[in-house]
Amino acid sequence: TPAGFNKTAVVTQFILVGFSNLEELQVLLFVTFLLLYLTILLANATIMTVICFSRTLHTPMYGFLFILSFSESCYTFVIIPQLLVHLLSTIKTISFIACATQLFFFLGFACTNCFLIAVMGYDRYVAICHPLRYTLIMNKRLGLGLVSLSTVTGFFIALVATNLICGMHFCGPNRVNHYFCDMAPVIKLACTDTHVKELALLSILVIMVPFLLILISYGFIVNTILKIPSAEGKRKAFATCASHLTVVFVHYGCASIIYLRPKSKSASDKDQLVAVTYTVVTPLLNPLVYSLRNKEVKTALKRVLGIPVATK
């Protein structure tokens, strides 16, 4: 039995180590994360409001963006409020049940976001490769079906993963080297390596399957764009994909660093920095990218705010 493990003991709560090694910076970190969290909520709420009140944005693409913004807001709600409490508290414990609940909702929204981003890639494929049939193919029924499928599949995978982790035996150290209950740091505390291979396979499937679907969509998109005779036409077609591609690279890049890296190369301190990117920066990046790089959203935002819009 490894040092610190006791096969007869049962862990009932965990200690989230988080940023404990930066004791003198706790207040500064609290203020930083609080401001970031409020910005995330405000930015996503702004995007959702603009989409709701602008008839020009009542299209499948912006419908998916609305759902993604809502999902990202819920995703951060699962993690950041508890982090803020722990930054100002000397007691950084979380019960086993609370940890499992946080893990389930974190994985559920994270998987849903992965699938939604893939769905948005398919939407871009239809818009560029089949423009004349776009409204016929991407109708309301298909849009709702794809969103429902993404959500149900995401939370089903989260349920399977959480169930596998809860089925492990925790009998020793209970210090989670992270600021929330993520898969890898919790699994490290298990006395046995039961289900580790299944969970690793699940992580690969959740990240790689949607990413491959996005690559296939963009393969067709690039092929279609290259056939456009004018340089201006090519530029406009690529511009419609720029926001989505930025989100894809950041989202899947961070997820790959954490979940697809060989075990031997794991570095918990670096993992926490990457985790800050995908739990805080990515949810903030989505609305900013779509509002700053998207002409339609910028115009709609000005109209909602009552700012005069220049028209040709």
Image (cartoon, rainbow, N blue to C red):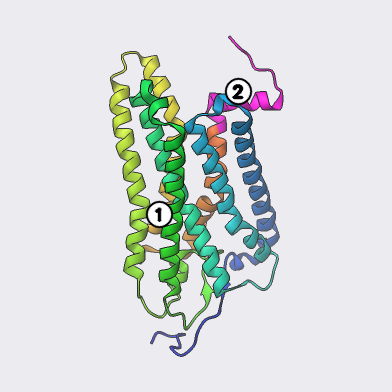
Q: Which mark is residue 163?
A: none
Is 302 part of what is drawn in magenta? yes
Task: Report the magenta residues as a range.
Answer: 291-312
Q: Amino acid at mark 2?
A: Thr
Q: Where, by quadrant of the figure, is residue 78 drawn?
A: bottom right
Residue at label 2? 299
Residue with the mark numbered 1: 257
- Mark 1 residue element: helix
Q: Quadrant of the C terminus?
A: top right
Dot 2 crowding, Cα within 10 Å, few <14, some 14–19, many 20+? some
Report x, y in % for residue 211: 35, 45
Extreme residue in the top direction: 312
Which one is nearer the viewer's eye here, 261 or 7?
A: 7
Amino acid type indicated by mark 1 = Ile
Work out which quarter of the rendered image holds the N terminus and state it: bottom left
User: Residue 182, relative to residue 193: is it above or below?
Assistant: above
Q: Is residue 291 visible?
A: yes
Q: Secondary structure at mark 2?
A: helix
Decide: marks 1, 2 in contact (CB < 8 A)? no
Q: Nearer the viewer, residue 64 or 26?
A: 64
Please name the residue shown 41% across and 31% down the image: 138
CA–CA distance in space, label 1 to label 2: 36 Å
First in sequence, mark 1 or 2: give its number. Answer: 1
Measured along the vertical axis of the image, is residue 270 above or below residue 286?
Answer: below
Q: Is residue 120 magenta?
A: no
